[in-house]
Amino acid sequence: MKTDDLRRRDVEMVTPPFAFFLSCKKAVGLAIWLVSAMMVPYAVAQFPDTTVTKPPEAGAPDDTPLTMVPHLPEGRYWVSGQSNFIYQTNPPFYADYSGPNSFRPYHERANGRVLTLYTGLQLMKSAEVLVDFEEAGGLGLSGGLGLAGYTNLDAVRDATLSQAPYLSRLMYHQVIGFSHDTVDGDRGPLSTFSRLPSRRLELRIGKMGITDFFDINSVGSDSHLQFLNYAINQNVAYDFTADDRGYTWGVLAEYQCPKWGLRFAEALLPGPENGGSLVWNLRKANSSQGEFELHRGPLRKKDGTIRLLAYVNNGNMGIYRVAIEQYLQGKVTQPDIGNHPLQVTSKYGFGINVEQPVNTNLAIYGRFGWNNGKTESWVFTEADQTFSGGIGALGPMWRRKFDRAGIAFATNGISSEHAQYLALGGLGFVLGDGRLKYGRENLMDSYYTAHIWRGIFLGPDLQFIVNPGYNQARGPVVVPSARVHLEF
């Protein structure tokens, strides 16, 4: 991508759709006020009355509480919490050589935790404010380095981050109904509404986690009760925007109807270096993503979901080919993807996400992801292509009503330019063995989660990784884990 044409674009500024919503912090508050003022009267008129609930149907699910403190099924307020504790270790493994960003080949142990307080307040029957606080601590194995499909989605990668609690989400959520018939609203941390119009527009603005809404999957998305690996829980080729805590500020619009759904988000991107603070000037950095959701699976007469994702990031990202040329021309002693003037370049990609229930207790899923692979990996991990798939099973199959288990596989790859950059000794933000004998990174993740009592869950997880960091000269790596999860 970057030749003379790209150099001429070094000072080019990119303005995305909806940039006026996020150009500065004051714009977020102004947008919330404007949305409320313009949308609330119409939404109140369209949003149905949910004060009358249906009686429980015959054969309704067991009402055993799965939280330490029971939650109210209705009401203006929501308060809940969770604690997730993960212990991981790895025995020594074979490695011809190691570099600054390698997964370390000797025995290691790591403890990590994430504690979250979720709160919500309905301002009216169609509008709410959600505010969450979080505390996270404990570095992952090898400090979060050396793997594209890293072993713990909850792990903290930056040792300099404070362990003090922080604001994780702050969202204004407005629902505009287009029908009088309703569907279950999945009342919880992301929405306090127990019923929603079957045809509706939802608007969210504020601080959020992009993967709370994009690329979700009922089989593999939840590191609290399901798989732990990056490449199983998410599309690792989706370089979604987030700060060093995993959140960003943005605007999200979503339309849902019985047969399909569509969502779009415009959000801030970190920079000028990856992992840094979010850039509030959208002419210098921004992230756009859209996803189409079809409410049917590939099997006829079976429920399921197919999601099609596309995204574009614009920011101060380097180009692998330019870094390689600098090194080969003797301008630098080591390829350095960050050795470029302040510029705005683009990284884009696509994803397919399919989940298919087989019966009430068994479901399968699959993901495919791809990005252009020429622009440096910026936020999530270093992967330019991925395939993953697996099976999730629920406990009633073996007479353990609230247990669950799963096994999944993934294969990750990078572009030829990305691989050459690493082979010449370049460092990415998570990879860099000093050399590279390229091979696809292949892995397996399996878990069992046992329900102990109320909101207490625990269980083992086992991962097996071949060619860690795309390097055939290292590995394979075995990572056993133990998890304790508490729901409040």
Image: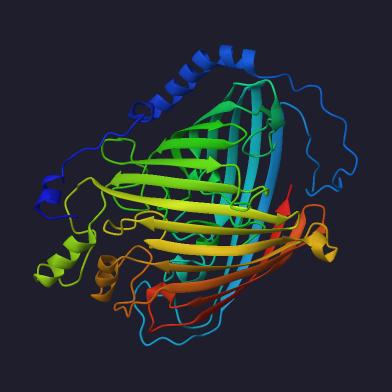
**x 40%, y 51%: residue:** 350
Left or right: 288 as drawn, with respect to 341 = right
Please tell me in which quadrant of the rendered image residue 453 appears. Answer: bottom right
Residue 39, percent across and down? 53, 16
Left or right: 238 as drawn, with respect to 19 = right
Q: Is residue 404 visible?
A: yes
Residue 275, percent across and down? 38, 53
Q: Identify the colour scheme used.
A: rainbow
Q: Nearer the viewer, residue 414 or 27?
A: 414
**x 49%, y 36%: residue:** 263
Q: Is residue 173 visible?
A: no
Q: Name above or below for residue 198 compared with residue 442.
A: above
Please tell me in which quadrant of the rendered image residue 193 appears. Answer: top right
Residue 44, percent across and down? 63, 15
Q: Nearer the viewer, residue 215 or 149?
A: 215
Left or right: 40 as drawn, with respect to 377 = right
